[in-house]
Image: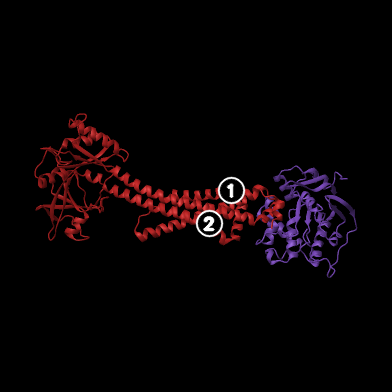
């Protein structure tokens, strides 16, 4: 008997008891669909967290200048500028794991268009900033190096600022706005970026080239950076290394001896992101294990019904043996029946799980992400459940004595 | 007693069942030889050992001691797989209670031995159709057992027994659940099979049925009591005659 014939016999036997077969697979269906739905939604949540951290910038480190102590009062990080422009250059050129380094100077300022005004934060920076932040331009052109060098009075607006100053869907490129009463030409509008993981609106900001910021907003060039430095590491895995190397570089440049505190600090946002990810992962694992338990229960259901089926069909087994079925034919038949039940449950479960995840995602505006490998694993796992729980009843059937089986009432 | 050419040859076969602490001697030394093409009826009272003998001849069971040669081959020491093959290729069974698979069409029931012989679907179907036609059920191939009379069901069972071209057909009380008219119909089929050269061994406790056989072996207390040859009579239906027989 070849496998195909065995399969056909098994399917025919299962179809003889349609309702019972359906109820038996229900356990697997529920288990698999739960796994699929949970994982799809869990992965969606994870992807959302990842995306929101990616929106902050890829492989991002933030270097904050150090603290000051005056008259016993310690000022906290950022209270005294300790980072120099030479430090910035050194970080960019001397540390191999650093790809980008950009200063970020900021000030609160009132912006005025012809008929509206809006108070927001104005940042002075260089083109690299937008690389670190992964932030493309939606309208107009991007900040260029020549903008920075020549100190042109141009501004790049976030979407929220555009909405407030020019109204929704307006294209302000080429128009003039006033920042602290100094006219700036709108050169570009940044793509909409949304909220930071902490709920801050990224789009409520205006960016001007560093030199213009220093001369017009800050009021004169200074030796120290009056802000923070953003660093983009070469890769995500290099962020840790970059943090270490930048620390060493700055300690060296600032002549900080062993045992002395840093006069700066570095925030590693990749770590924060992975901590958040860990949280979602734990939740997903928890839900998936509950689902796995229900799969196990489904498997026991299959075993139970297969045992009933073997008893009920004892005579059939006897007849099959009398006409020449070998023990292994009987074993294969019942095993394939269990396997078919479990596999059918797995496949139906995947379909229902995807459908359910879709419904939940639309209903509650949850993100979802379908991972093909999870689909494969759940179907394979249900097949395994079928084999494991089908084996005992099938062995029992194959070991029946044909005479007893034929006489069974 | 047994000649080497015999199709079935039992030599001093015993069978002992262990039921708890008690040993039950179902067969106490049976020697029997059946030539190819014979029609043998095995008779005997309940507990005479005729069913045990049938099980051993049918390769469903193995003797405790003694030898059993089936078509010249010693089969009393074969394992379960080898016995299954013998049942599949050399033997065909007909039971008192038909033992058809329920909710399964006649043709699928008949196909069963061919399925285990590893034949392809088309050939299985073809041969099953032939076998059903041979027993006069060519027009009821797709009927299920519950849509057929007892006689028709038993004819399906006979078709199943002969579909794999066995050397021997073993029938255990084949008319036990049938009325006398149907019994005669069914017995006529066995006669035809014998005429076609198939060896038929029939277990019955109804003397009416045994008259069809050319040879009657009577069992008693696990031994062959008598083994006589007779002129087979083709029984004719007698109203109110042999009614449905009881269980053994």
**Along the line of sight, the residue nearer the viewer: B128 or B54:** B54
**Mark 2 belongs to which subunit?**
A
Kindly give the residue lying farthest to the top in the view shown.
A258
Residue A265 appears left or right of A286: left
Q: Position of residue A270 (x, y in %)?
A: 29, 43
Q: Residue at x 42, y 58 (%)?
A: A356
Element under disc 1? helix
Q: Position of residue A272 (x, y in %)?
A: 29, 44
Report whether residue A323 is seen. no
Q: Position of residue B55 (x, y in %)?
A: 76, 51
Residue B40 in the image: above or below residue B185: above
Q: Residue at x 89, y 52 (%)?
A: B226
Instruction: Find the distance from the CA under tag 1 to the CA under tag 2.
Output: 16 Å
* Image quadrant occupied by the C terminus of chain A: bottom right
Residue A369 appears left or right of B5: left
Label 1 crowd (10 A; few <14 / some 14-19 / many >=20):
many
Q: Which residue is mark 1?
A: A391
Using the rendered view, name the quadrant where residue A81 is placed: top left
Q: Which residue is mark 2?
A: A25
**Along the line of sight, the residue nearer the viewer: A170 or A401:** A401
**Mark 1 belongs to which subunit?**
A
Q: Residue at x 16, y 55 (%)?
A: A174
Chain coloured red in the rendered structure = A
Q: Position of residue B67 (x, y in %)?
A: 80, 43
Q: Colour of chain B?
A: purple
Count of labels shown? 2
Q: Label for residue A166?
A: none
Element under disc 2? helix
For marks 1 and 2, the one nearer the N-term is 2
């Amino acid at each position: 008997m070849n496998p195909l014939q065995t399969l056909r016999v098994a399917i025919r036997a299962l179809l003889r008891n349609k309702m019972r077969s359906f109820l038996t697979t229900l356990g697997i269906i529920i288990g698999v669909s739960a796994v699929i739905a949970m994982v799809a939604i869990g992965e969606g949540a994870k992807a959302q967290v990842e995306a929101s951290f990616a929106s902050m910038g890829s492989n991002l480190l933030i270097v904050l200048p150090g603290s000051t102590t005056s008259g016993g009062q310690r000022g906290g990080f950022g209270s005294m500028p300790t980072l120099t422009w030479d430090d910035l250059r050194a970080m960019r050129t001397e540390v191999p794991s650093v790809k980008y380094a950009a200063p970020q100077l900021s000030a609160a300022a009132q912006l005025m268009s012809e008929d509206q005004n809006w108070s927001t934060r104005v940042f002075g920076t260089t083109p690299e900033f937008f690389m670190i932040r992964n932030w493309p331009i939606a309208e107009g052109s991007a900040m260029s190096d020549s903008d920075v060098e020549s100190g042109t009075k141009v501004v790049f607006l976030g979407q929220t600022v555009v909405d407030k100053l020019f109204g929704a869907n307006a294209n302000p490129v080429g128009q003039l706005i006033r920042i602290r009463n100094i006219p700036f030409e709108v050169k570009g509008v940044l793509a909409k970026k949304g909220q930071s993981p902490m709920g801050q609106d990224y789009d409520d900001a205006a960016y001007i080239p560093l030199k213009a910021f220093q001369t017009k907003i800050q009021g004169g060039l200074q030796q120290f950076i009056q802000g923070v430095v953003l660093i983009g590491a070469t890769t995500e895995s290099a962020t840790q290394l970059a943090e270490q190397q930048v620390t060493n570089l700055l300690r060296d440049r600032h002549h900080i001896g062993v045992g002395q505190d840093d006069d700066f600090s570095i925030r590693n946002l990749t770590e924060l992101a992975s901590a958040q990810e860990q949280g979602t992962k734990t939740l997903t694992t928890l839900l998936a294990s509950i689902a796995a338990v229900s799969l196990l229960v489904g498997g026991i259901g299959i075993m139970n019904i297969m045992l009933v089926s073997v008893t009920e069909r004892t005579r059939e087994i006897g007849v099959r043996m009398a006409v020449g079925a070998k023990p292994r034919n009987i074993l294969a038949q019942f095993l394939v029946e269990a396997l078919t039940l479990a596999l059918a449950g797995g496949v139906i479960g995947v379909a229902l799980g995807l459908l359910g995840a879709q419904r939940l995602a639309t209903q509650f505006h949850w993100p979802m992400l379908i991972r093909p490998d999870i689909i494969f694993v759940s179907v394979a796992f249900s097949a395994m459940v079928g084999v494991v729980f089908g084996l005992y009843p099938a062995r029992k059937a194959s070991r029946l004595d044909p005479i007893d089986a034929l006489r069974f009432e | 007693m047994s000649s080497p050419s015999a199709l079935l040859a039992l030599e001093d076969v015993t069978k002992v069942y262990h039921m708890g602490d008690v040993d039950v001697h179902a067969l106490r030394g049976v020697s029997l030889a059946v030539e190819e093409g014979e029609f043998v009826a095995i008779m005997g009272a309940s507990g005479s050992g005729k069913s045990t003998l049938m099980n051993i001849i049918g390769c469903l069971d193995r003797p405790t001691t003694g030898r059993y040669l089936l078509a010249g081959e010693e089969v009393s020491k074969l394992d379960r797989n080898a016995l299954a093959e013998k049942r599949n290729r050399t033997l065909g069974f007909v039971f008192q209670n038909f033992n058809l698979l329920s909710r399964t069409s006649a043709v699928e029931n008949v196909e069963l031995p061919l399925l285990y012989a590893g034949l392809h679907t088309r050939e299985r179907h073809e041969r099953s159709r032939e076998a059903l036609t041979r027993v006069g059920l060519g027009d009821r191939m797709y009927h299920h057992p519950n849509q057929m009379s007892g006689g028709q069901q038993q004819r399906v069972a006979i078709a199943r027994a002969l579909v794999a071209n066995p050397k021997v057909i073993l029938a255990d009380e084949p008319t036990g659940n049938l009325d006398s008219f149907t019994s005669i119909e069914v017995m006529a089929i066995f006669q035809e099979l014998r005429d076609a050269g198939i060896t038929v061994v029939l277990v019955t406790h109804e003397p009416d049925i045994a008259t069809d056989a050319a040879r009657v072996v009577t069992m008693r207390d696990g031994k062959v009591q008598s083994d006589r040859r007779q002129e087979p009579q083709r029984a004719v239906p007698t109203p109110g005659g042999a009614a449905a027989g009881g269980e053994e």
